[in-house]
Image (spheres, helix red, strand yellow):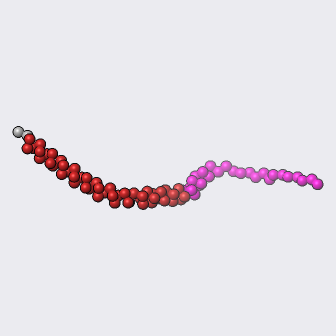
Amino acid sequence: MEIDFRAERTTTTVNVFRPIADAARESASVMSESLASLITVVVAVIPWLIVIVPGGWFLTKVWRKARKKRAARAAELAP
């Protein structure tokens, strides 16, 4: 029994634009993954905004009130 194996040679042309074509094909995948990440971040931040925005508003009111009191005391003490 004799087995003769010969690999068929094919001439492959080097395609200079192949990386660009691959990148174009993969761009939809990258875009969808980025959009998924953005949606995840937005969904994670929304509950914190419900707490932070009213808290910031309250702290701003307290800060302004304290500044007015300090200014009024400074005006009373000034000759």
**In-image side of 56 versus 75 (left or right):** right
Residue 73 occupies quadrant: top left
Eyeballing the image, is 57 above or below 74? below
With 57 as the anchor, is 72 left or right in this view?
A: left
Left or right position of 49 against 66: right
Residue 69, how many percent across, how many down? 14, 48
Q: Is residue 68 magenta?
A: no
Q: Nearer the viewer, residue 6 or 72?
A: 72
User: Horizontal and vertical percent for residue 35?
Assistant: 47, 59
The residue located at (42%, 58%) in the rendering is 44
Give me the residue at 45% from left, 60% from top.
Answer: 39
Q: Tell which residue pokes out farthest to the right in this image.
A: 1
Residue at position x 80%, y 53% from top?
Answer: 8
Q: Which residues are magenta?
A: 1-27
Residue 5, magenta (yes or no)? yes
Main SS, magenta residues: loop
At 31% across and 57% down in the image, what residue appears? 53
Q: Position of residue 24 (x, y in %)?
A: 56, 56
View extreme (left): residue: 79
Left or right placement of residue 24 versus residue 59 in this view: right
Residue 50 lies, with reference to residue 66, above or below; the image says below
Count of residue discs: 0
Quadrant containing the N terminus in the rendered view: bottom right
Judged from this view, the residue extending furthest toward the top is 79
- Quadrant of image for the C terminus: top left
